[in-house]
Image (spheres, rainbow, N blue to C red):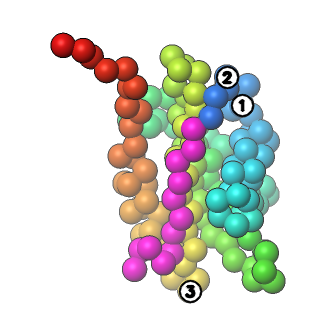
Amino acid sequence: GLGDVYKRQIWEMEGDSSLLREGMLFDIRDTITKKYYSGDYVVREDSYVITSDFQGKHATKIIGLWRNDSNNDLVGGPFRTYIVHDKEKSKFYFIDYAVQAVGKLKQPYLDQLEIMARTFEVVSSTRKTE
């Protein structure tokens, strides 16, 4: 099933637009995925950053390949990360998904995960009192 071939995660971090440099974004993803995905890292020569749209908002998107060669197993596959900047809160949201489907076509999984990723929305923490 789909659960056997993908990873997905949403991270929140504070910062400003200086974080949006390609090398910095790769480093941030590496730091987070080493912790949550047991050592995954961005294959820099096969990854790049583009400007994108995310639910009508300006976003940055990383398109690339990940690899994890811990435990003497070399595994990897395609990943996508949307970086959405909430300027009002000075926060960035990293919406990340990755596929590991040895011997299978990856695009159908990427397409399904893209649909799931686009359901993310920032919910205001302020409540109206009546």
Residue that badge 1 annotates: 19
Q: CA distance from mark 3 to mark 1?
A: 36 Å
Q: Residue at position x 56%, y 86% from top?
A: 103
Does residue 25 lie above or below 80 as drawn? above
Q: Position of residue 59 (x, y in %)?
A: 53, 33
The answer to whether the residues at label 1 and label 2 have Cβ atoms under 8 Å apart is: yes
* Rendered image: mark on residue 16: 2
- Res. 23 image quadrant: top right
Q: Quadrant of the C terminus?
A: top left
Kind of element beneath mark 3: loop
Q: CA distance from mark 1 to mark 2?
A: 6 Å
Residue that badge 3 annotates: 103
In the visual, does 119 lie left or right of 15? left
Between disc 3 and disc 1, whose residue precedes? 1
Q: Position of residue 51 (x, y in %)?
A: 58, 35
Q: As shown in the figure, which amino acid type bears the numbered disc 2?
A: Asp
In the visual, does 47 lie left or right of 118? right
Kind of element beneath mark 1: helix
Q: Residues within 10 Å of mark 3 (few under 14, many from 20)?
A: few
Q: Position of residue 117 (x, y in %)?
A: 43, 50
Q: Position of residue 85 (x, y in %)?
A: 55, 28
The answer to whether the residues at label 3 and label 1 have Cβ atoms under 8 Å apart is: no
- Would residue 105 be visible to someone looking at this image? no
Q: Residue at position x 38%, y 25% from top?
A: 124
List the single residue furthest toward the front.
130
- Res. 114 image quadrant: bottom left
Nearer-the-camera pick, 101 or 33:
33
Q: Magenta segment range?
A: 1-12
